[in-house]
Amino acid sequence: MNPRSTDMPHTGDGPLTPDRLRRLPSRVLGIAAAHADQLVSAGLAAADARKWHYAVLVALHDLGPASQATLSRRTGIYRSDLVAVINELTSRGLVERAPDPTDRRRNVITMSPAGRGALDRLDALVAALQDDLLAPLAEPEREQLVELLARLVDHHGGRVAPPAG
Amino acid sequence: MNPRSTDMPHTGDGPLTPDRLRRLPSRVLGIAAAHADQLVSAGLAAADARKWHYAVLVALHDLGPASQATLSRRTGIYRSDLVAVINELTSRGLVERAPDPTDRRRNVITMSPAGRGALDRLDALVAALQDDLLAPLAEPEREQLVELLARLVDHHGGRVAPPAG
DNA sequence: GTATATTGTTAGTGCGACTAACGCAAGGGC
DNA sequence: GCCCTTGCGTTAGTCGCACTAACAATATAC
């Protein structure tokens, strides 16, 4: 217990943070996730995209044309927030929104050819970003990391914030 | 590529989410962190505390009386946000804020006896919460997980969002 | 045919990270 | 002594994201 405030010149809290916090699982997890999020968000922003754009395009690719409610469930994006995301995607010409003739409550969202192109590009980008993120880990370690994390989220299954990037 | 919108009755996106997203490192990381954050935030809230309260108390324990700026650097909490945190801690009687006679720009934050008691209780609580969080992992796996995460954050060193819980 | 549930949408809440700007005080050069 | 720079605490405000509430239109169940 240092009795005096330690004011050394300093940036970056690496060695300053005590182990009690530094190795606290929930904290490391949070910090790592923040780094990851920042990294991919910045990368996607440079391509005029956001993580949900990617998530929705992936969902559309797997599902084919789908209603917003379906996309919401699939991606975890709240249907209220999805409205804006679809707006952004349509304004970029990556997706089309049309009323569903068979159920007039619904909109059918369809990926355009441009959307498919964008998805391919984003796929590559995202892969590259994952690589940046995992740079300090060797291949088997990377696999182990995502496997451990996957077990964590499987265990605490219920509905939570699903960052899409 | 299912051409039709799949509307099965469903809650929880486990099996619905395609592997492309499910095993995307940045995404699993984000989701796991969200779960962790929710878990410890809820746990701490039940004890009338927030994660930063804990972070600040730990810092004060390690450092002894310290200025807000020092605490900010140590915990990663922005000094603008720290104001409110210290307010909350003082209103709970866990901490005292007094002007520093040796440097009249500063406040000296001192942990009260009640604060020490609270820290002890929170230490136990947080440990229990970590245990809940890591429930599905065996001991060596837990260590491996935090080690891998620690290497990630060490590598991407720069200043980022440091969730304290 | 009336109740109930679902869909898309708008608006709004709450919170966490982060910036801008302020008044004040300290320290260094000269 | 006086500038200039730097650090401090504080206030206010921005931005993005998770999440709720309510609504009108429509579909489904009874």
Image (tube, coloured by chain):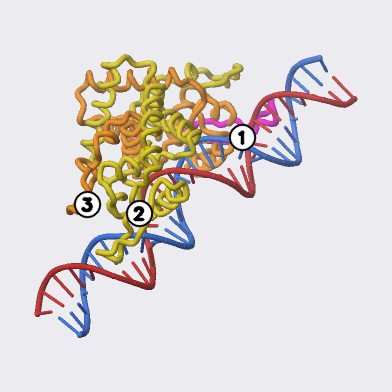
Chain colours: A orange, B yellow, C red, D blue
Residue behind mark 3: A4
10 Å neighbourhood of mark 1: few (<14), some, or many (≥20)? Answer: few
- Is residue D28 depicted above or below D8 in this figure? above
* Closer to us: B64 or D19: B64
Question: Residue B115, percent across and down?
Answer: 38, 42
Q: Are marks 2 and 3 on the same chain?
A: no
Question: Disc 1 to disc 3, how far (Cα)?
Answer: 66 Å
10 Å neighbourhood of mark 3: few (<14), some, or many (≥20)? Answer: few
Q: Report if the CB atoms under discs 2 and 3 are less than 8 Å apart.
A: no
In the image: residue A20, left or right of residue B35: left
- Is residue A77 depicted above or below A148 in this figure? below
In the image: residue C22, left or right of residue B3: left
* SS at mark 1 in the image: strand
Foreground disc of the pair 1, 3: 3
A104 part of magenta stretch: yes
* SS at mark 3 in the image: loop
* Closer to us: C10 or A35: A35
- Whether residue A117 can be seen here: no
User: What is the magenta range?
Assistant: A96-114
Question: Residue A22, percent across and down?
Answer: 27, 35
Mark 1: amino acid:
Ala
Which one is earlier in the sequence, the residue at label 1 or at label 3?
3
* SS at mark 2 in the image: helix
Question: Disc 2 to disc 3, how far (Cα)?
Answer: 19 Å
Residue behind mark 2: B79
Question: Residue C23, located in which quarter of the rendered image?
Answer: bottom left
Mark 2: amino acid:
Arg
Question: Residue D22, percent across and down?
Answer: 72, 41
